Image: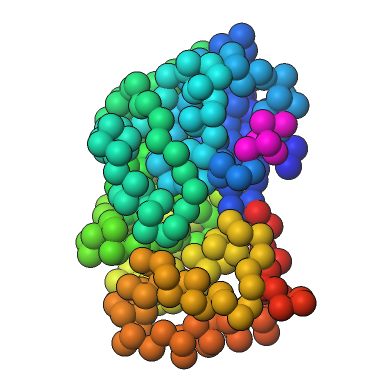
Amino acid sequence: MSAVEIMKDLFFIERGYLNSNHFVYRSEQPVLIDTGYISDFAITEQLIEDIGVKLAQTRLIINTHTHCDHIGGNSIIQDRSGCDIALHKVGKYFMDTGDDWSPWWRYFGQEAGFFACTIALDDGDLIPVGPYEFQVLHTPGHASDGIVLYNRKEKVLISGDALWEDDIPTITMRVEGSTCLLDLLSSLEKLEPLDVEIVYPGHGRPFTNFKEALAKSKAKARDFLNHKEKTGDSLLKKIIIYTMLMHREMDEESFFDHLMGTYWFKETIDFFFKSEYRQTYEEVMRNFLRRDIVRRKDGKLFTTVEP
């Protein structure tokens, strides 16, 4: 997890599946983009301070959306520094109204905390990150408050979870609405005219094959539209792994009951898998164990996916 300087004093830090990637502008008044998951904050702080940035001096945090893996450090850093926090205006509404459902926190049983959003962003706005100017583009689909940040001069796209290299992000129709795949397609089409040399996504490594990644994402989104069960299968598998990462390990005997106690699991099975709770769970877990994505030891389940 070493930092890469992508422009002078602007660093990219790649994390794993549980935590979003970070961006840090190093100066006497640092700017951060996305702050990871709250349980890993100590690691986040160390990674940022290794660049030479003191979090207590932070001037501004910009979030690509308000999911827990992108805003986990916000309240801690804001308490220390009094910094501004910039979100799309939809995300600001979530924070202002104390809505822990729309950013998925309560729906998926995630740990997250409210904070004061002091800057509301809108589609087409320009926001400075130190001397670098980024255009804000609203990209709903995965998240109703999702944005990407585009630097036209350097042809750099900070894509959040709107665009990954080889997959599309989790699609949660029961929170984002039944048209969210159509929203994702519209967001991807909005990105197509951009002149991009390199993409820094919210998860995963940077990539230069911008047009190819767009085409893959659009094709997968259309496939999900045509095959409803694929949307459910993807959500189920991703969030089960995410749950294991959040808890580090789960008791094998009680894991199914834990999932049944959440909003998301039962509703996903009802919506996509004809309410076949146990059967669907066992099929997914057999698949994970066979592929070594999940392992069992001493009655515990844990995942091999990097957090």
Can you say which quadrant of the picture contains the N terminus?
top right
Predominant secondary structure in magenta? helix
Residue at image location 72% in from the left, 19% down from the top: 52
Q: Answer whether residue 284 is magenta in the image.
A: no
Can you say which quadrant of the picture contains the C terminus?
bottom right
Looking at the image, the residue that sits furthest to the top is 28
In front of the other: 149 or 78: 78
In the image, 83: left or right of 249?
A: left
Q: Position of residue 257 (x, y in %)?
A: 49, 77
Residue 141 higher or lower than 239, as above or below? above
Residue 151 higher or lower than 148, as above or below? above
Q: Position of residue 166 (x, y in %)?
A: 53, 61
Residue 119 higher or lower than 17, as above or below? above
| Number of callouts | 0
Residue 180 higher or lower than 138, as above or below? below
Residue at image location 44% in from the left, 58% down from the top: 109
Residue at image location 30% in from the left, 49% down from the top: 102
* Visible residue check, residue 180: no
Q: Please state the extent of the stretch shown in magenta in the rendering.
A: 41-46
* Visible residue check, residue 90: yes
In front of the other: 83 or 153: 83
In front of the other: 68 or 134: 68
In the image, 67: left or right of 289?
A: left
Q: Position of residue 294 (x, y in %)?
A: 67, 74
Q: Position of residue 275 (x, y in %)?
A: 33, 85
In front of the other: 107 or 285: 107
